[in-house]
Image: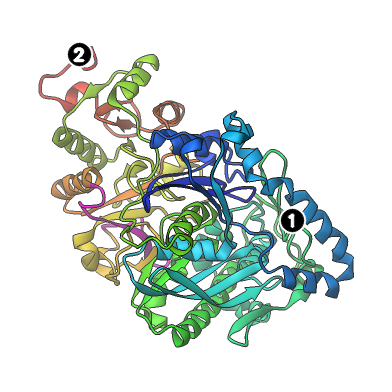
């Protein structure tokens, strides 16, 4: 049975294909059309899903969309009636969305087929149920507490649920305008981070701040009736677009969230790209602090309703890895399952799996055990791309490749690591990664100066062999999708200085051989050479969506000051790159020169 899941006309549009209950392929449209956070119709992603399983759209029996504009209609009407000025906006929004609901016509147009050939049944699932479904149905559990939170989706910002067997029973919703995501976004905007998706950057700024504004910021969002509420005087009124607008070209644009009251209390908002002051850092600190307090309150309440050790969590706010890392100390939950695309692209798999299990009553056997759900490319395709680019390369066996790359990392070189299937979700997890030495004091600056050009305060992440997590970090709970931040043990901070954040934490990826044997072997080879079972892992890109194809990887390698590219079985070394001794391809092999001919 083929089910196509979609997130469409919403940020991070995506598609996923589920075959007999297993997610076989999933991808965000941005990776294919190279338009970051693209929020239109995921036409290329749909085609990629169908190609991946060798199907035609006429073979698809069900299409499931993680959005239902009829959900919570009574609450929307109630809000509109209480705010008469918004009624016109509300009607306009519904009218604008009407053509976007016609999945059959959109699909026929995108795939250039007659809509008469499309025999699929269509399902629309409320946004946050799709989020929770994306976590629960991918987890190994038969029962769990379900939690979803973000800016907004189908007029809801937070949902708590009981997940058992095939069913997700909604226990509570927090309706707009009250939203922890909006609270976070509002303060990010105030301190100059105004783009969709900037919240993750500001999370890294928070530890540089002090508790100067915790009391003031604490007044903006307060617990209420087991949920929370915003003091709306700090916000611009909720508009027709719920603070986020999708432009006709698919660009996601945020509207200004903060009101003049913020300026009266805290002065002028910071202009993007201007100097970051102590005030901005202190506001970031207070924002993260309050966010965590409310998050913990919500989870503790959820646990009183669903007495389980297991928490299946999703939604854009579930990407707050700092909060995730603390929940084991502050709530009764002992295990989390957060699938790698916890944000809105994950709605595609949530909607599809919900259709399979809850609507069609099919039993559960599937567990999502790794993030590698995207495209892969043959060695011959990669070789041809290298030849076209005129690059000198050498083909190596598995063991030679990991040994050569580990050796390059050990001497301080920066390596583009492009292997196997692309990751699903926003994190590079060892298949579309840039890897480097985690223990060189200047490595963060080198990466930023040569390739990444990121804000100075953003940390780089460590990938660690799962067997060594407890030796290096203060928590044991695995973090295979890089979604938890833990304290690094004091005695290991020097060895991990390039990935040790200012508060002595790291957003780790635990790597097991079962999940990614090649990446595991690479880190093991680095461990043998240096005694450190960790490498620095950052996404393979330069201010663009993460590279998907070999062409994009080669292009990124050539236009940045990366030293080495390991792409499939091929290795390319840029001669004379870097401040250290130049290593040539011939030096990597016993027989020396003439590497690519
Ligand atoms: Fe969402």
Q: Callout 2: few (<14), some (14-19), or many (20+) C-alpha neighbours within 10 Å?
A: few
- Is residue 547 something one can see in this rendering? no
Where is residue 252? Give x, y as percent: 66, 48
Q: Callout 1: few (<14), some (14-19), or many (20+) C-alpha neighbours within 10 Å?
A: some
Residue toward you, 180 or 163: 163
The residue at 77%/66% (across/down) is 238
Q: Quadrant of residue 570?
A: top left
Q: How is the image coloured?
A: rainbow
Residue toward you, 277 or 419: 419
Where is residue 441? Give x, y as percent: 34, 51
Residue stretch in magenta: 495-516
Where is residue 581? Give x, y as percent: 26, 31
Q: Secondary structure at mark 1?
A: loop
Is the residue at mark 1 in contact range of ligand 1, meaning its CB lies under 8 Å from it? no
Q: Secondary structure at mark 2?
A: loop
Q: Quadrant of ligand 1?
A: bottom right
The residue at 30%/51% (across/down) is 438
Residue toward you, 250 or 180: 250
Task: Check disc 1 and report the residue beneath it.
Answer: 255
Where is residue 223? Give x, y as percent: 61, 84
* 124 up-or-down from 317: above or below: above
The residue at 67%/79% (across/down) is 229
Task: Check disc 2 and report the residue beneath it.
Answer: 594
Dominant secondary structure of the magenta stretch? loop
């Amino acid at each position: 049975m083929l089910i196509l899941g979609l997130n469409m006309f919403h940020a991070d549009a995506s598609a996923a294909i589920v075959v007999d209950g297993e997610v076989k392929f999933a991808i965000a449209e941005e990776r294919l059309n190279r338009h970051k956070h693209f929020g239109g119709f995921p036409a290329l992603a749909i085609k990629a899903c169908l190609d991946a399983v060798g199907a035609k759209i006429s073979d698809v029996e069900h299409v499931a969309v993680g959005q239902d504009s009829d959900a919570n209609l009574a609450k929307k009407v109630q809000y509109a009636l209480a705010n008469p000025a918004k009624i016109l906006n509300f009607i306009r929004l519904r009218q604008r969305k009407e053509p976007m609901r016609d999945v059959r016509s959109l699909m026929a147009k995108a795939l250039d087929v007659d809509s008469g050939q499309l025999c699929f049944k269509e399902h629309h699932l409320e946004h946050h149920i799709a989020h929770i479904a994306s976590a629960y149905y991918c987890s190994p559990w038969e029962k769990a507490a379900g939690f979803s939170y973000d800016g907004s989706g189908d007029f809801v910002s937070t949902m708590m649920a009981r997940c058992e067997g095939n069913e997700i029973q909604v226990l509570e919703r927090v309706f707009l305008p009250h939203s922890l995501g909006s609270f976070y976004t509002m303060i990010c905007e105030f301190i100059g981070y105004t783009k969709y998706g900037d919240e993750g950057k500001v999370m890294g700024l928070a530890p540089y701040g002090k508790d100067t504004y915790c009391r003031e910021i604490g007044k903006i969002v307060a617990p209420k009736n087991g949920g929370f509420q915003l003091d709306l005087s700090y916000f611009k009124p909720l508009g027709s677009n719920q603070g986020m607008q999708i432009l006709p070209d698919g660009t996601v644009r945020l509207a200004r969230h903060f009101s003049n009251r913020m300026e009266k209390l805290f002065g002028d908002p910071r202009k993007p790209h201007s100097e970051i002051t102590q005030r901005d850092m202190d506001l970031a600190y207070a924002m993260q602090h309050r966010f965590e307090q409310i998050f913990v309150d919500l989870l503790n309440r959820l646990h009183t309703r669903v007495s389980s050790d297991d928490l299946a969590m999703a939604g854009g706010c579930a990407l707050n890895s700092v909060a995730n890392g603390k929940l084991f100390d502050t709530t009764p939950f002992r295990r989390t399952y957060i699938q790698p695309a916890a944000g809105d692209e994950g709605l595609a798999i949530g909607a599809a799996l919900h259709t399979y299990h809850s609507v069609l009553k099919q039993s559960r056997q599937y567990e999502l055990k790794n993030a590698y759900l995207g495209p892969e490319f043959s060695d011959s395709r990669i070789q041809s791309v290298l030849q076209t680019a005129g690059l000198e390369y050498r083909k190596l066996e598995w063991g030679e490749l990991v040994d050569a790359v580990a050796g390059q990392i050990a001497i301080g070189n920066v390596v583009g690591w492009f292997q196997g299937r692309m990751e699903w979700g926003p994190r590079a997890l060892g298949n579309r990664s840039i890897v480097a030495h985690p223990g060189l004091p200047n490595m963060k600056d080198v990466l930023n100066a040569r390739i990444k050009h990121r804000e100075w305060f953003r940390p780089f992440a460590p990938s660690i062999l799962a067997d060594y997590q407890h030796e290096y970090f203060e928590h044991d709970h695995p973090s295979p999708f890089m979604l938890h931040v833990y304290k690094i043990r004091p005695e290991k901070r020097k060895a991990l200085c390039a990935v040790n954040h200012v508060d002595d934490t790291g957003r780790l990826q635990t790597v097991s051989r079962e999940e990614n044997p090649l990446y595991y072997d690479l880190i093991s080879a680095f461990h043998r050479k240096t005694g450190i079972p960790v490498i620095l892992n950052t996404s393979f890109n330069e201010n663009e969506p993460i590279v998907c194809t070999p062409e994009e990887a080669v292009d990124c390698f050539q236009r940045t000051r990366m030293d080495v590219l390991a792409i499939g079985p091929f290795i390319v070394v840029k001669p004379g790159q870097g401040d250290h001794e130049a290593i040539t391809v011939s030096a990597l092999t016993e027989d020396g020169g003439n590497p690519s001919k």
